Image (cartoon, helix red, strand yellow):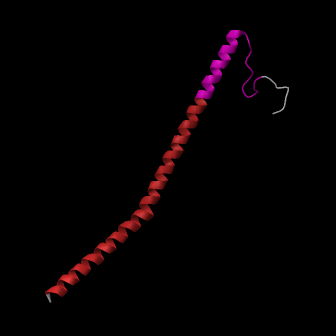
Amino acid sequence: MRILTRAGSTLLTGLVGAAAYDAVRTTITRDGLHEGAVTAFAWGIRGKRRAEVAAEQLRLATGDLVAEARARTGEQSPPPGVGDVAHDHDH
């Protein structure tokens, strides 16, 4: 009788442990992994936006420097969006 009690106890403990493991695994897989992936993508999007803002600020600052350098040498800077000098050849 004592062996059956121990076997039953062991079996019950194993079943409870397996059920708990499956519940945790399902929760992590369904919610945790998804939530982690969404968080990672959100960080990536924020980082990309910051990089784009920094690149635009650098582009504007460089344009200001070039315009000032041209002004010091007596050249006139083209209006924004017009481009530099025309080319006589195709690319």
Location of residue 90 by image quarter: top right
> Considering the image in quadrants, where does the N terminus appear?
bottom left
Location of residue 11 by image quarter: bottom left
Left or right: residue 40 versus residue 83 is: left
Pinpoint residue 17: horizontal percent, then vertical percent.
Answer: 29, 73
Location of residue 6 by image quarter: bottom left
**Vertical relation: 47 (above or below) 11:** above
Q: How many marks?
A: 0
- Seen at 69% across and 14% down, the residue is 70
- Seen at 58% across and 37% down, the residue is 52
Range of the magenta residues? 58-84
Left or right: residue 2 versus residue 12 is: left
In front: 77, or 10?
Answer: 10
Left or right: residue 62 versus residue 5 is: right
Pinpoint residue 72: horizontal percent, then vertical percent.
Answer: 67, 10
> Considering the image in quadrants, where does the C terminus appear?
top right
Left or right: residue 9 versus residue 25 is: left
**Vertical relation: 73 (above or below) 53:** above
Residue 65 falls within the magenta-colored stretch: yes
Residue 11 falls within the magenta-colored stretch: no
Pinpoint residue 69: horizontal percent, then vertical percent.
Answer: 66, 14
- Seen at 17% across and 85% down, the residue is 5
Residue sitting at the far right: 88
